Image (cartoon, rainbow, N blue to C red):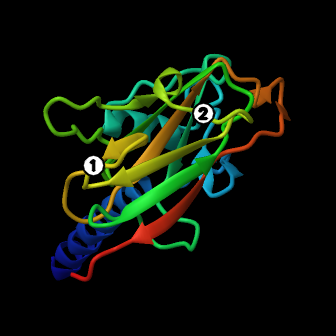
Amino acid sequence: MPSIFYLSIIIIVGLIGSGLSVASMLKNSTSPYGLEINQWRADPKSGGLEANPYQRDLTAISGSLPLNANEAVTFHRATDDTGERLNFRCTYKISDEISNTRFWTLNLVDNQGRVIKPSEGYNIALYSQHLIFDTKGKFLLTLSPQPHSGNWLPIKGEGQFRLTLRMYDTPIVSNSEIFETNLPNIARIHCPES
C-alpha cells in the first residue's frame, strides 16, 4: 500500500514539474525558425501553416493574431545596441532606415507581449507615413518619458519594455528566400539613476 502512495506522489510531482517546465519554455521562448536582423527578432512562420505547436500556444496565450509572412512580418526587440534591456526611465534614439517595406508601425509592448497604452492624446503606435525623414530616407526617433521635438514616441511605465516593429507588404521572407534589409539601431542616450 505505501508503494502505491509513493508512486502516486512521484507521478503528481512529475506532472507538476512538466507543466511548469512547458509554461516556462513558452514564456521565455525564442522561435526555432527565428530571423534576426540587427538584434530585431522575427518569426515569419508564426502566422502560417508551418507554425509549430509551441508557436500556436504562444499565439493563444498572448491573444495576438499573427499575419502570414506574405502580409506582414513582426519584429521584436528588448535591448539597446549595447545589449541592455529597454527601460521606461531611459531616453533612446532610434535611427537609420527600414528598407524593403511599403508601410510599417512601431509600438511598445510589455514583457508578455501586450500593447502598452500611451498617455491620453497620444497614438498607440508610430506609423511610417507620420515620420519626418531626411533626403536619404533615414529617420531619427526619440523614445523618452519627456517630450522631444521631431519624431517622438512617449514611453510611460515601470521597469522594462520591448518594441514591436510590424512591416507590411514586405519581401523580407519570400519563397524561403531572405531578402537583405536594414532595421534601425537603438542607442541609449540618458538613463537617470534609480
Image quadrant holding the C terminus, namely bottom left
Q: Residue at x 22, y 68 (%)?
A: 8
Question: Is residue 174 something that shows in the picture?
Answer: yes
Classify residue 158 by image quadrant.
bottom left
- Does residue 75 sit above or below 77 in this rendering? above
Q: Residue at x 73, y 43 (%)?
A: 182
What kind of element bears circle 2?
loop
What kind of element bears circle 1?
loop
Q: Residues within 10 Å of mark 2 (few under 14, many from 20)?
A: some
The image position of residue 46, as x and y in percent, is 56, 33
Residue sitting nearer the eye, 132 or 127: 132
Q: Look at mark 2 in the image and give the residue it sits on.
A: 133
Q: Residue at x 37, y 44 (%)?
A: 149
Q: Are marks 1 and 2 in contact (CB under 8 Å)?
A: no
- Does residue 175 sit above or below 9 in this rendering? above
Question: Is residue 29 something that shows in the picture?
Answer: no
Is 26 placed left or right of 95 in the picture? left
Mark 2 or mark 1, which is nearer the start of the sequence?
2
